[in-house]
Image (cartoon, rainbow, N blue to C red):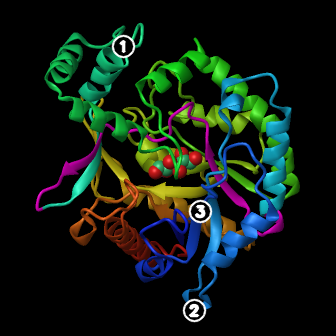
Amino acid sequence: MEETWRWFGPDDAVRLDHIRQAGARGIVNSLHQLPYGVVWSVEEIEKRKAIIGADPSLGLSWRVVESLPVHEKIRRGDRDCAQLFENYRASLRNLAACGVRTICYNFMPVLDWTRTELRHPLPGGGNALRFNAHEYVGFDVFILERPGAAEGVEPELLARAKAWADGATQEQKDTLLASIMAGLPGAYDRYDVPGLRAILAEYGAITADDLKANLRRFLQEIIPTAEECGMQMAMHPDDPPRPLFGLPRIVSTEQDVADLLAMADSPANGLTLCTGSLGAHPTNDLPKIAARFAGRIHFAHLRNVAKEPDGSFMEADHLGGDTDMVAVVEALMVEQKRRKEDGRPDWRIPFRPDHGHELADDVGKPTFPGYPLIGRLRGLAELRGVMTALSRIKGLPL
Ligand code: DNO
Ligand code: MN
């Protein structure tokens, strides 16, 4: 397995030499400074490559793009997207010309990964990310006041949500909003409550089927180009894997993944196996999903979650939580063996420790939420231990 690490670019408090100290060589990167929908020029891509490779003794290179963002108009299914599709294809061609061929992206409308709590205290100090179902409902029903938000919510959960909203100070409400927005990548504007209402209104009453049709259209537009360029598109699943604020999410379950891969039956149309995202869904069996779709997994995000009965979940230690991480890693390593035996030069699957706890000297540092140095370094070390042991015991190639 190829060790990679998400780096947010020159603004990241985690430096490239830190990443090398953690052991990773592959950099996962995006051009966060560019607005959504514009072409990534060869010049901008080369500039970033030069920064990543500036100190050759570190041996780092840009391995995966995360993300090449899909414009909201494409997700929403606007008619006049021809230029946006053309720009996306141009960015793919430019990236391929610069040697970057694995592209992680997502199809989550409006938001990206979403939590309600960025600093849940851990025993002994340090913090974890959490999704608290009552805070989510409290925000949706009593702060956003989205029409219909209370429909279908368990009365007991709704009562706890109301108690939370009634008791929360303005500061607590602001912190919740900031937590919900924290997953939007890079230096982008986050929505305030009126802004969120406005963008939700633009989506109107979109259904999961509508969103799937929009995804199919996107894949029809870009997969042929990805094929021509020898690129691997790797869809990131929904985090959390459930509808949010009335917007459907369509890459949440094993069946959704099967549907996505069937929409364009091409090796270029693949998956980022994010165990933490899929793992927060009650019916997803991660080792099974990893084994079933192994041939189309181009990238892996490895982390764990501990689920709670009301739909809340907490980001757990990488080898803790509800997902059998050893079994997932084994499935990926079995796939690597197959690729190697097929003579593929690129048989190693890139993975990164996806999120880590904020631990020790990282507490209080201006790292990106979920992306501190020490917690990810710990996660990567634990995962590397699993891989090393599996390789020895099962004879699987590392
Ligand atoms: C969360 C990440 C996601 C991911 C995007 C990919 O930490 O795994 O934000 O980068 O969804 O498009
Ligand atoms: Mn992920």
Q: Secondary structure at mark 3?
A: strand
- Indicate the position of residue 256 as horizontal and vertical percent values: 58, 31
Decide: marks 2, 3 in contact (CB < 8 A)?
no
* Residue 184, horizontal then vertical, whole percent: 49, 44
- The percent coordinates of residue 254 (x first, y second) are 53, 35
- Count how many numbered circles sit on residues in the image: 3
Image-based side of 279 in relation to 1, left or right: left
Q: Amino acid at mark 1?
A: Glu
Q: Earlier in the sequence, mark 3 or mark 1?
A: 3
Q: In the displayed structure, does residue 385 sit left or right of residue 205?
A: left
Looking at the rendering, in which quadrant would you find the N terminus? bottom right
What residue range appears in magenta?
96-124
Note whether ligand 1 is within 8 Å of mark 3. Answer: no
Q: From mark 3 to mark 1, how far is it between C-alphas?
A: 36 Å
Dot 2 alpha-carbon crowd within 10 angstroms: few under 14, some 14 to 19, many 20 or more? few
312 or 345: which is nearer to us? 312
